[in-house]
Amino acid sequence: MGVTIATHNGSSVAREHNIRNEKVVSKEKHIRKDGIYEIWIDEKVRDAYHRLFDDAVAKYNEKQSRSDRRIEDYYAEVNKDSRKHPVYEMIISIGNRENSVSDIIGKKIMREFVDTWQKRNQNLELIGAYYHADEEGVPHVHIDYIPVAHGYVRGMETQTGLVKALSEMGFEKKGKDTAQILWERRENQYLESLCARQEIIVEHPKEGKSHLNTELYKLQQEIQNEIDCLVRIKDLEKKERAVAKAKNIKFLDKMMLVLKRTLSKDEIEKILKEWNKLSKIEKETAKRASDELIEAYKSTPASIRKRLDSYKQQTNKTSNATIKEKNQRHEKER
Ligand SMILES: [Mn+2]
């Protein structure tokens, strides 16, 4: 019987989780204190930005006659830009809880994937690689990278930008497939080829299962977008809109942690803060639903989608009821 492999890619990076910062991971119950983890590569994002972009910033600033056009802190600018992510992360793993390979072989394969990353991905600067064999589920590696692209006409000549970086590496949108999808597919195939070299057969889940994975993936992406939104938004009006969005995703918080485990403490705190503003009944529904969702995730995959659907309905009902209730109260007050 073969094993499945995973190469999940996202823009949520939690270095403190990755380097096992005691303060952060002591609160993450799924991490075993005596478990094995290794830090293979670890460069702070801010340091990497200096290394990668300082020259381009200097060249750009030289040409500016107006002092207000100068770039003082490129990393801060990228953080402010809602269309850009300062750093991305791919999480790779081989097998699953029920069916996996030996830790030694798994680690060897994933190490090779990391060691060959920069050669394979010249425009995706590797700044972190962390081997975690101390969590529930199978060992996995967090791979953190910054996309670097050249030839920009506006602004600095060299900037961060995933699509342009991938384009420089030869990945262009083709039909329905975005450059990112095509690149992710290549990376997945490469991991599979490394497995094959160790005589490990990689299984591709059948229709139903892969459909479920797609659903979960889409959900994850959705949540990720919302989180990005919450984290980035600074001004009040937009914040209110973000709170409204948070209401729609509230029951998925824990599932997100279970599935992805890459939220930083700050991100979680920010979301929780928003959620504290929710009504009691909304909170109760959210909590109940997410607790059960974790159980569902731990049991059979087939039950997940069913439950997801029912929770979605449940939550919608509750928020509709709350809105109705509020409106009624409003009516009475008038
Ligand atoms: Mn981890």
Image (cartoon, rainbow, N blue to C red):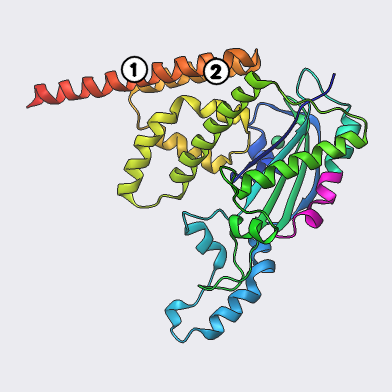
Quadrant housing the N terminus: top right
Q: Secondary structure at mark 2?
A: helix
Q: Which residue is mark 1?
A: 317
Cβ of mark 1 under 8 Å from ligand 1: the answer is no
Three-letter amino acid code at the position of disc 1 = Lys
Q: Which residue occupies 41% across, 49% down? A: 233
- Looking at marks 1 and 2 on the same chain, the residue that comes earlier in the sequence is marked by 2
Three-letter amino acid code at the position of disc 2 = Arg
CA neighbours of label 2 inside 10 A, class few (<14), some (14 to 19), many (20+): some
Q: Which residues are magenta?
A: 112-123
Q: Quadrant of residue 201?
A: top right
52 or 190, which lies in front? 190
Q: Let me know if residue 60 appears in the view.
A: yes
Q: Let me know if residue 284 appears in the view.
A: no
248 or 154, which lies in front? 154
Quarter of the displayed picture in which ligand 1 can be seen: top right
Q: Quadrant of residue 221?
A: top right
Q: Which residue is mark 2?
A: 305
Task: In the displayed orientation, state which residue is furthest to the left.
Answer: 334
Q: Position of residue 161 (x, y in %)?
A: 58, 59
Q: Which residue occupies 74% across, 26% down? A: 204
